[in-house]
Image (cartoon, helix red, strand yellow):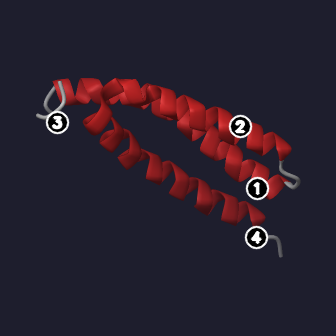
Amino acid sequence: MNWNGILIGVISFLIIGCYHPLVIKGEYYFGVKIWWAFLAAGIIFGVWACLVPGIFWSAILGVASFSSFWGILEVFHQRERVRKGWFPKNPNRK
């Protein structure tokens, strides 16, 4: 029996779930200027996904890569959610 598909699905779910608080905390502490870190992570994970042998780890790194790219958009959306009052604003950040 091949469990790779189920494992990729579970790990993808966990990776995506980890990016939600990363976006929220990143915007809280750094504002939208944190987007470049998500871009760098996405590029690094993407290159790494192309270089690893084996489909399992390549798929996991590909999910991490595109979750990072999606995080860029979500940081800007998070700024709007903060502006609307749905999330707290960092009083120490200007």
User: Label 1 to label 3, Cα distance in Å?
Assistant: 37 Å
Disc 1: which residue: 57
Q: Residue at x 51, y 49 (%)?
A: 16
Q: Are marks 1 and 2 in contact (CB under 8 Å)?
A: no
Which of these two is toward me, 38 or 56? 38
Residue 92: percent from left, percent from top: 14, 34
Amino acid found under the numbered disc labelled 3: Asn
Residue 91 lies in quadrant: top left
Q: Are marks 2 and 4 in contact (CB under 8 Å)?
A: no
Amino acid found under the numbered disc labelled 1: Trp
Q: Earlier in the sequence, mark 4 or mark 3?
A: 4
Instruction: Tell me if 59 is positioned left or right of 41 in this view.
Output: right
How crowded is the residue under tag 4: few (<14 C-alpha within 10 Å), some, or many (20+)?
A: few
Residue 4 higher or lower than 87, as above or below: below
User: Label 4 to label 3, Cα distance in Å?
Assistant: 43 Å
Secondary structure beneath label 2? helix
Amino acid found under the numbered disc labelled 2: Gly
Q: Which mark is residue 90?
A: 3
Instruction: Tell me if 39 is positioned left or right of 75 in this view.
Output: right
Q: Residue at x 35, y 25 (%)?
A: 32
Q: Which mark is residue 46?
A: 2
Query: Which of the image's four quarters has the N terminus?
Result: bottom right
